[in-house]
Image (cartoon, coloured by chain):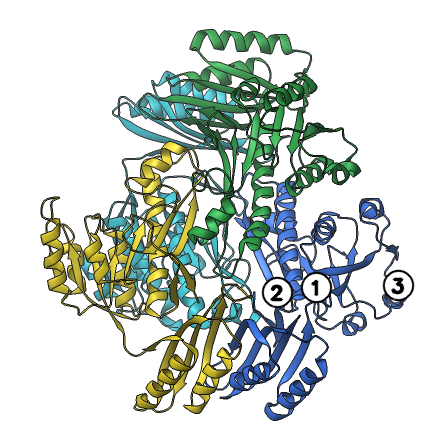
Chain colours: A yellow, B blue, C green, D cyan
Amino acid sequence: MAAVRLLVSCPDRPGIVAAIAQSIFKLGGNITQSDQHTTDPSGGLFFMRVEFTLREPADRAALGAEVDRLTHAYGMQIVVRFAEERKRVAIFVSRLEHCMVDLLWRWKTGELPMNVTGVVSNHPDLSSVAEPFHLPFAVFPVTAATKQEQEQEILACLDGQVDLIVLARYMQILTPRFVAAYPSRIINIHHSFLPAFVGGRPYEQAAKRGVKIIGATAHYVTEGLDEGPIIEQDIVRISHRDGLEDLVRKGSDIEKAVLARAVRWHLEDRVLVYQNRTVVFA
Amino acid sequence: MAAVRLLVSCPDRPGIVAAIAQSIFKLGGNITQSDQHTTDPSGGLFFMRVEFTLREPADRAALGAEVDRLTHAYGMQIVVRFAEERKRVAIFVSRLEHCMVDLLWRWKTGELPMNVTGVVSNHPDLSSVAEPFHLPFAVFPVTAATKQEQEQEILACLDGQVDLIVLARYMQILTPRFVAAYPSRIINIHHSFLPAFVGGRPYEQAAKRGVKIIGATAHYVTEGLDEGPIIEQDIVRISHRDGLEDLVRKGSDIEKAVLARAVRWHLEDRVLVYQNRTVVFA
Amino acid sequence: MAAVRLLVSCPDRPGIVAAIAQSIFKLGGNITQSDQHTTDPSGGLFFMRVEFTLREPADRAALGAEVDRLTHAYGMQIVVRFAEERKRVAIFVSRLEHCMVDLLWRWKTGELPMNVTGVVSNHPDLSSVAEPFHLPFAVFPVTAATKQEQEQEILACLDGQVDLIVLARYMQILTPRFVAAYPSRIINIHHSFLPAFVGGRPYEQAAKRGVKIIGATAHYVTEGLDEGPIIEQDIVRISHRDGLEDLVRKGSDIEKAVLARAVRWHLEDRVLVYQNRTVVFA
Amino acid sequence: MAAVRLLVSCPDRPGIVAAIAQSIFKLGGNITQSDQHTTDPSGGLFFMRVEFTLREPADRAALGAEVDRLTHAYGMQIVVRFAEERKRVAIFVSRLEHCMVDLLWRWKTGELPMNVTGVVSNHPDLSSVAEPFHLPFAVFPVTAATKQEQEQEILACLDGQVDLIVLARYMQILTPRFVAAYPSRIINIHHSFLPAFVGGRPYEQAAKRGVKIIGATAHYVTEGLDEGPIIEQDIVRISHRDGLEDLVRKGSDIEKAVLARAVRWHLEDRVLVYQNRTVVFA
């Protein structure tokens, strides 16, 4: 028995849900979870995520034919995913370990359904921390002058064998060329409540502004710095007692939690992107 | 154009969603929101709330026929609601005003889509507080000896002209006979995080136990005291600094918020009850 | 018996707490609450709020003498407040009622220890809403051309008889001259999680950016728009389902809660300002 | 320079703070943090935590003399702690790793200021998980019949060389004799929002009751099961979508966070116990 997920996007119009549900019924599928969203009841965009079980995993040809039919008949964009096909994930880090360790631990205990292919870093510092997880740890040093070249080497190393890149406090800004190679497939954790405190040193900025709450934001990476579609955010309360090191410590826990949720939702095909925003069928 | 809501419950089996969606399509309806839940992927219960717009509000006969057909063909229980038919609500209070005032204010400003028919109390104290809202304020004093009689009078006063009763800190325990007259149609706010601190004086109990968080719970009233299906809960953090009066004050804000959310979801037909639990399609 | 509060600010150095505590002991006072904060253990600023009971309320001369002595001996700035002297508060509104109604209700039920002297508005719209509270409701229409003049009229109307101005969604930007007349005595509620979404239409900005959490911020008003010292912030989670009107509705509840907490803390002399930040001894 | 902490408990009366502050001043100490709490302004208990720096760490004799003097003059109970003397901690586990791994990771990265002396378990399962932390991992199997004996062996193994025991999901109930050996020095994490769902299988209980929020509670262990003084609690929101395994997963994150905060506060001497409650000077 295979668990199949369809991610559907199209202009809203009557009959869409009936058509999709009818196709799944014809395939002998049983819907186990279904979510939909219409951006505007009077003529907006329609998004749907439907998960169903198919008795015959081999019967993908019939599924493909139905998807083709729906695509042409309704102008739908349909992405088909099989839950059993785990996504291949590369984790990028620099010198801070907490997000990397948290993801690897959730992976190793089976909480996150992914295949981690390796860790990429611009520094060798964390290789010993990653060691107990028995993963390739590839170091690509970088300077302002060598960034183009370094990114080319990383792309060559990934070799298209990766479905998702997670920037787990990777302190480098990726070039548009790199980003374009993995559209909506690079998740970054930014250690502030975006759009507050874009860019560098957000905890210092937060301490200076005297905010009473700090946050973290997981988003897909786009060309604009910290401007990509937000997947998840969360916050923690602080007070005048908390110095910069307290902000870093409290914020670290939020970063881990937010990033883990965003990665989970991506892995489970729960995130759709439109107009620089996300629909999260969590 | 009418906004129609179907609330569907039945044993899960393939084809249900297709059948419902097909019926709506045949009726010319456009689905604007749809949620479903299956309690157990391998043979559980299926719940669905689907909201759609019908061009012809007069065409209720066709809708009724489709609902009948689905009911018989699939063993579905289907409740049909029209958004434009606002529920008639009676608010029960005793001597504490905050929940009543909050509900009435949200009603008057149009935030809660309901028709408040009046306030019922076992004390006259709050009549002047309710006065600016220009509502009937009916006082039914009660003692242990007169409870049966008092409830009969209230039932007679309501005269079946009420769709929902909200116990906005009504400090009387309703008898099973009264509860039976309004099944899943009486919402109570309990000032604790149920099942902690069932019964009387939950804030005193919380202070004595030394908890670090207090809460409030909105639930449908059943025969068992504070044991009905929970609709919504929320909490607020406290510390050793907070005395009993602080718990009461901080708790009051949570009571208001939780009750308002539960009432809103009930009014919008977002709550389904099964096995003493709720499915909330919020 | 009088409840006295001292708010102390000075450069940190050994012996300060001993000196203050000794003075209170000499006065026969019993400390009921005491909080202190040092910005930097190695030579920063020292802040203290100490609340104590004095048996002889008439004995203010002795208190004054002790405060003078401490002021000169340690270079302290000391503010003396008596809990029984309730602050006089003017509430400024425009057309949105929720914050005003919430504050007035908390005032009328005794939750907020203040004397509301009246409501000031640039529109007459809310006068009927305020009517049940039996307060002066003064309307000062304003245009870009008449702002200076209008503010002069408001200042004349307040006549220095007000200790705190609360901008309860007053949609006018105050001129520096007006702000200078009430330094650290004007509290504004901004309907975003500052510094995100400064300025106009923050809910629209939030919807456009696709954030997953919205917030509200209470701050003292300074010359810079939305840049004054933050007193309190809070947030509420939203999703792709929430349209602009949902953000407004959910945000309204947070605005009310945040503003009420900030006003309470100010009324209880729990907020100290330094370097555009606040120390809140809550 | 030594950082000293005094934890003071005594009946409230005027002059206490002055006496303590004066003593610290005489010792040449500079107060860096100070918190106090009076349970009842009209004659309750007084608690204080004061942290100060002493220039002469060797001058502990003078400190001891001052503490003795205060103890006798005011009937104070005073505990003296030096921040540099890290507490020795034993972590008890059974088969679930998440709390143990989280604590060990926070210890290894320096976030938790403690010396972990080893891990104690009634099962060998987690020894390989603990292996990268290079700690003694002692296995003491237990049955109902051998519990007394097993506990004796553990006590012998600890040999009084441990300041704190953390039950990081140790699934055994300790006997009163064991508990008496470490009064207010055993912290347990219970995977529910106490007092809701005392005892076994709280997540199952929560799922059955249909709550909308689950929680975790860190408390000192006393004779009564799950009845000891609560140090910290936190919650996470759930919905009808969350099955038992989701509750376990979401709850695990809360367990880790709550336990880490409680342990941190204990290590920093921020928790005082009275009447089965805690004062937490966080």
Badge 3 and badge 1 in a common chain: yes
Nearer-the-camera pick, C88 or C45: C88
The N terminus of chain B - image quarter:
bottom right
What kind of residue is marked 2?
A: Ile
In this rendering, the answer to whether B69 lies above or below B205 is: below
Residue C265 on image: x %, y %: 57, 32
Q: CA distance from mark 1 to mark 2?
A: 9 Å
> Which residue is label 1 attached to?
B187
Residue C179 image point, x, y percent: 54, 22
Give me the residue at 20% from left, 52% from top: A175
Q: CA distance from mark 2 to mark 3?
A: 28 Å
Disc 1 marks a residue whose amino acid type is Ile
Name the residue: 55% across, 30% down: C173
Is residue D282 depicted above or below D225 in this figure? above
- The answer to which quarter of the image holds residue C116 is top right
Type of amino acid under label 3: Gln
In what element is the residue under mark 3?
A: helix
Label 2: which residue? B231
x, y percent for residue C197:
45, 42
- Label 3 resides on the chain identified as B
Compared across the picture, whether A111 is left or right of B119 comes to left
Q: Would you say residue D133 is visible in this rendering? A: no
